Image (cartoon, rainbow, N blue to C red):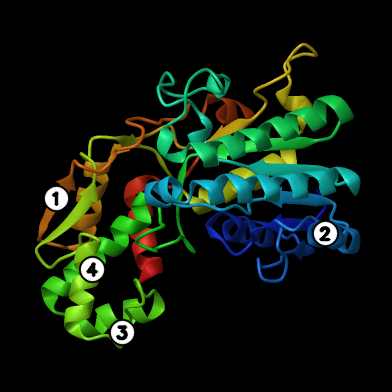
């Protein structure tokens, strides 16, 4: 890519897209294009087509998606599969139609089977059943991988699919109903600690920025205590879904962005194809290759915040996949490795949130 090439980052305000946008700017790219979901609904085929006709981007990074944690994935199943399939279909089709030079499609490591051998290699895709709680989202992302593969093989396009592990970082989603585990724990422990310290100014300021079920900083103390308790947050304890035993790999979002720009700058589809007989599994895992238990993560966050209450594990709630560690040997062989480990990353996200 040249520094003046037009690069469209779909989803440039989210956790993933904002980190990629920042990385591109820091590397000197000057012709970036972004649209909020209000400005451009990528689920709308006509609107997406009109956008590509008008802008004619040279390169596209598709990070726009309907995303969420275990609760949201399990509850909004139809929304997750329908919306993600629509976004992917519209963007990939228009990339081909308008001659985009290169597309990077971003998915998630939830595409892999629930019981895949660990660490998970790229060729584990479609070798077994998925984790049921996020199956609709995973199937949508698998469809995106297969779309990019198929366009490359049939039409000679230069589309790459990258599968980041669990991400966290600036502009993450801290909604207690819909967020992923790490940002949810950050917010839960902060609120519990403020309750314990009776720091109502901090609590009300937090709720003014991110209301919970309509409860904000103007609500009375009892309303606030009640709504927080429904999400397992009290002055005495923080409740966490499941047993705490599942192991998870976490990647700082700005490391992920660096990997994405690395792939856009240096890696083509031809670099990922071993020989002409290969028809699948050209996608690339992006991760750290390191893991921590949910219990260990909770204890680390608790320590960083200085909360002195208890951690309670609700074993009536699902754990999800027990282990999901990525094999990152492929991207290491291409020349990229992460730089921020979990201990440093927790400190960084706490500072950003506060």
Could you give the CA–CA distance between mark 1 and mark 4, rounded to whole angstroms?
15 Å
- Near-viewer residue (36 or 302): 36
For the point 77% across and 13% down, which residue is it?
A: 275
Which image quarter holds the C terminus?
A: bottom left
Q: Earlier in the sequence, mark 3 or mark 4?
A: 3
**What mark, if any, has residue 46 been given in the picture?**
2
> Are the two marked residues, 2 and 4, in contact with CB atoms closer than 8 angstroms?
no
For the point 53% across and 58% down, which residue is it?
A: 15
Graded by Cα atoms within 10 Å as few (under 14), some (14 to 19) or many (20 or more), the crowding at tag 4 reads: many
Q: Which residue is mark 1?
A: 312
> Are the two marked residues, 3 and 1, in contact with CB atoms closer than 8 angstroms?
no
Q: Secondary structure at mark 4?
A: helix
Q: Is residue 249 left or right of residue 327?
A: left
Position above or below: 209 against 76: below
Please state the horizontal and vertical placement of residue 22, each as a whole percent of the image.
61, 61
Could you give the CA–CA distance between mark 2 and mark 4, rounded to whole angstroms?
42 Å
Q: Is residue 337 visible?
A: no
Q: Is residue 71 left or right of residue 91?
A: left
**What mark, if any, has residue 228 been given in the picture?**
4
Please state the horizontal and vertical placement of residue 262, each as a whole percent of the image.
66, 43
Position above or below: 280 against 19: above
> Are the two marked residues, 1 and 4, in contact with CB atoms closer than 8 angstroms?
no
């Amino acid at each position: 890519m040249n520094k003046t090439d037009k690069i469209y980052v779909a989803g440039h305000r989210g956790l993933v897209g904002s980190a990629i946008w920042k990385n591109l700017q820091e590397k000197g790219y000057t012709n970036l294009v972004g649209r909020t979901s209000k400005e451009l609904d990528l689920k709308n085929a006509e609107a997406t087509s009109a956008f590509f006709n008008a802008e004619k981007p040279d390169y596209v990074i598709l990070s726009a998606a309907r995303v969420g944690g275990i609760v949201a994935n399990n509850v909004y199943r139809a929304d997750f599969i329908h919306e993600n399939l629509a976004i992917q279909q519209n963007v990939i089709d228009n990339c081909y139609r308008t001659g985009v030079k290169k597309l990077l499609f971003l998915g998630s490591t939830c595409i892999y089977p629930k019981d895949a051998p660990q660490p998970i290699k790229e060729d584990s895709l479609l070798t077994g059943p998925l984790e049921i709680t996020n199956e609709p989202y995973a199937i949508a992302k698998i469809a995106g991988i297969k779309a990019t593969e198929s366009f490359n093989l049939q039409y000679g396009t230069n589309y790459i699919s990258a599968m980041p592990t669990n991400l966290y970082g600036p502009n993450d989603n801290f909604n207690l109903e819909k967020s992923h585990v790490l940002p949810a724990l950050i917010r839960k422990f902060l609120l519990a600690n403020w309750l314990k310290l009776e720091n109502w100014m901090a609590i009300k300021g937090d709720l003014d920025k991110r209301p919970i079920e309509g409860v904000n900083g103007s609500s009375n103390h009892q309303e606030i205590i009640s709504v927080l308790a429904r999400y397992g947050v009290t002055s005495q304890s923080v409740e966490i879904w499941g047993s705490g035993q599942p192991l998870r790999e976490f990647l700082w979002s700005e490391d992920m962005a660096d990997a994405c720009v690395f792939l856009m700058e240096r890696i083509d589809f031809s670099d990922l194809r071993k020989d002409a007989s290969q028809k699948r599994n050209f996608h690339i895992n992006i991760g750290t290759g390191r893991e921590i238990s949910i219990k260990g993560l909770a204890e680390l966050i608790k320590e960083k915040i200085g909360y002195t209450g208890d951690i309670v594990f609700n074993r009536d709630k699902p754990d999800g996949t027990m282990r999901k560690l990525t094999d990152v040997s492929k991207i290491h062989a291409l020349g990229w490795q992460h730089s921020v480990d979990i201990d440093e990353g927790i400190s960084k996200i706490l500072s950003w949130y506060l």
